[in-house]
Image (cartoon, grey):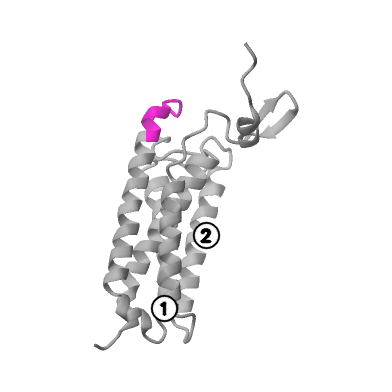
Amino acid sequence: MQTDPGRLTLPALLIGFALGGFLDGILLHQILQWHHLLSGVTDPADLRFHMLWDGVFHAAHYLLGFAGLWLLLARRCHAAASGAGRVLVAACLIGFGAWHILDAVLNHWILGLHRIRDGSPNALAWDLLFFGLGVVTVALGAWLRRRDGGPGGRAIAAGLACCVLAGAPAAALPPREVDPVMQLSAGGLLPAFCAAWTRTEAPR
């Protein structure tokens, strides 16, 4: 059977796109809590509603990630072709960057579902930084796509699979009910996640 590294492009694009969504959901929705999927169109204090739709957001990216993994498995014979590693990395970068561009243009500016940092006086600057990350990543992937050589396809395929499988359980972390930026504690100003993790119940 003749191998064609180009057959790995679609699965790597899907995996890269899913990883872009995981980065947004895990880092910005859960760890930093800068926004939720629908925080621009409804009350940000309604955490049950926002956690529901953030869960739908994650579930959609799970489906995309596992679809990419399934296609990658189905086309694994092409991973032995010359240049397969380069194709995988390049397509993954393009998919990752495409997520950031689509999210910024569609969700932030056209639909107004949320901004990168809700409530910031420099909301547009944060959005542009997010958009710029997407443009740079897509450009890097396109540049790499045209180059010769690169790492082995099977090693890259295994790495992409590990990234998706590692990102999935991290997205299931529970939310914190503290300010995501800073919180005044007895010991002074601490990052909110530090205060949340070190806080203990008062003795009864």
Up-down: is 104 above or below 160?
A: above
Q: Residues within 10 Å of mark 1 (few under 14, many from 20)?
A: many
Which quadrant holds residue 18? bottom left
- Find the residue positioned furthest to the right: 187
Local SS, label 2: helix
Residue 15 inside the magenta-drawn segment: no
Residue at mark 2: 133
As measured in the structure, the alpha-carbon distance from the residue carrying label 2 to the one carrying label 1 is: 25 Å
Q: Quadrant of the N terminus?
A: bottom left
Q: Earlier in the sequence, mark 2 or mark 1?
A: 2
Q: Residues within 10 Å of mark 2 (few under 14, many from 20)?
A: some
Identify the residue shown where x is 44% and y is 82%. Answer: 146
Q: Amino acid at mark 1?
A: Gly
Q: Quadrant of the C terminus?
A: top right
Identify the residue shown where x is 46% and y is 49%. Answer: 24
Residue at mark 1: 153
Magenta stretch in the rendered image: 42-51
**Does the rendering let one see residue 172?**
yes
